[in-house]
Amino acid sequence: MSMMNTFDAFFNYRDNELYCDDVSLARLADEFNTPLYVYSEKGLKERYTEIDSALGDVPHVICYSVKSNSNLSVLELMKDMGAGMDVVSGGELFRAIKVGIDPEKIVYAGVGKTVEEIEYALASGIRMFNCESFQEIETIDGVAGQLDKNASIAIRVNPDVDANTHHYITTGKKENKFGITVPLLMDNLDILKKCKNVTLKGIHAHIGSQIVTVEPFENALDRLMSLIENLKGEGFSEITTVNLGGGFGIRYNDEELFDVNAWASIVKKRVTGSGLTLIIEPGRYIAGNSGALVTRIVYKKKSETKTFLITDAGMHHLIRPSLYGAFQHIRNCFLREGSEVVDVVGPICESGDFFAKDREISLSQQGDLLAVLSAGAYGMVMASRYNSHPMPAEVMVHGDGSYSLIRRRESYDDIIRHEVI
């Protein structure tokens, strides 16, 4: 089991000062101000390599999930590591193409692809669409016909596997909006056979996010392999890929460590010798523990019953605690003796604007810097300008101790740039 799968692998104290690898977070905050997202290049590389190495000789493509962290520098790094991309919108496809990803390594998922997005993807020469409904397949067939192209597709099936995760991020149960159930697919193969401009090249499933045990993946893969055999028996002989999606859990608090090697052993046992190429779509697992949100305490406010640390970052910069009730470790960038129980809250005019409630952290003062850990995935990508706050800056810390600004902090002019009076 990999012992690197921990929230603090790339963010550690040195002489009571918190570092990202070899760079002090306080130094970065002084240079780039706060709120500030900080990413470890070392972390991103190690997590990708861990999965790639575990899969070994199994024919595979690791399509990094752009939705988890879509900064161009992160995508460029993933490209250099050999990754493909899993995109869910025309905008994400544009980002992938912008950094030079081989279109043959791009898979396009999502339940609501528009005609314009389908046209863009076909013109770009992507590897395949992951299709989520019969209507979508028929739409792609029509668009491909108009463009005189043939579209390669995988069908996202809903294998009715319980991923044992938060109900907002489980996606493989039959009541979820994603995918097509296996019985419904088998009952409607005529729809596929009537389509002249699509070719079924694969079967896809993504059963949820933040999964910490391997059994749900094992159950899903068994069902996918059985389905592929049945489809080949129905004449769909061009199926060459099985896509197991993503969803590997990371450590936010005290979760069980996800065992990548055990997962890979299960996958290799089933895929080796099948003639199929495995596609997987990890995002959070690569980026999540590789990032932190650094924020400054603007005020320390005490009421009769509570102590509030009011920071310059909030739910508009990292929405997971407000949206999911998610736990994220919070550390003072300068460790003092003693601790206190506080609410860590932001500046937004919403009662739901908090990072933690009744949380014990080390003693903190007005002006201190806090780091919200495990924020490399589903942090900046979900950020907004709510209350007309500019978007934060982002910095990448490199393995040699240097660092780069990878997104400039917005100005007030940037906030209103596209508005018209």
Image: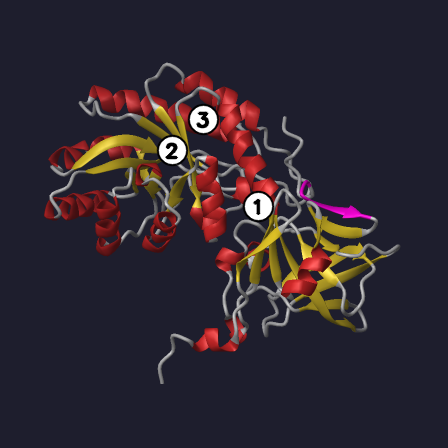
Residue under pointer 3: 219
420 falls in the magenta region:
no
Callout 1 crowding tier (Cα within 10 Å): few <14, some 14–19, many ≥20 = many
On the rendered image, what quadrant is the C terminus found in? bottom left
Left or right relative to 359: residue 142: left
Q: Quadrant of residue 210?
A: top right
Q: What residue lies at 37% left-to-right and 45% top-to-bottom?
A: 100
On the rendered image, what quadrant is the N terminus found in? top right
Query: For the residues marked 1 and 3, what is the alpha-carbon distance in whole angstroms?
Result: 25 Å
| Circle 3/circle 2 CB separation < 8 Å | yes
Q: Quadrant of residue 354?
A: bottom right
**Label disc, if present, on residue 159 of the rendered structure:** 2
Label 3 element class: helix
Query: For the residues marked 1 and 2, what is the alpha-carbon distance in whole angstroms?
Result: 26 Å
Q: Label 3 amino acid? A: Asn
Left or right relative to 345: residue 393: left
Q: Quadrant of residue 241?
A: top left
Q: Label 2 amino acid? A: Pro
Residue 165 visible in the shown view: no
Left or right relative to 156: residue 350: right
Residue extending furthest toward the right: 337
**Residue range highlighted in magenta:** 9-14
**Label disc, if present, on residue 272 of the rendered structure:** none
Left or right relative to 57: residue 11: right
Q: Nearer the viewer, residue 420 or 76?
A: 76
Q: What residue lies at 76% left-to-right and 62% top-to-bottom?
A: 342
Q: Position of residue 75 (x, y in %)?
A: 45, 47
Q: Position of residue 390 (x, y in %)?
A: 53, 71
Q: Position of residue 147 (x, y in %)?
A: 13, 47
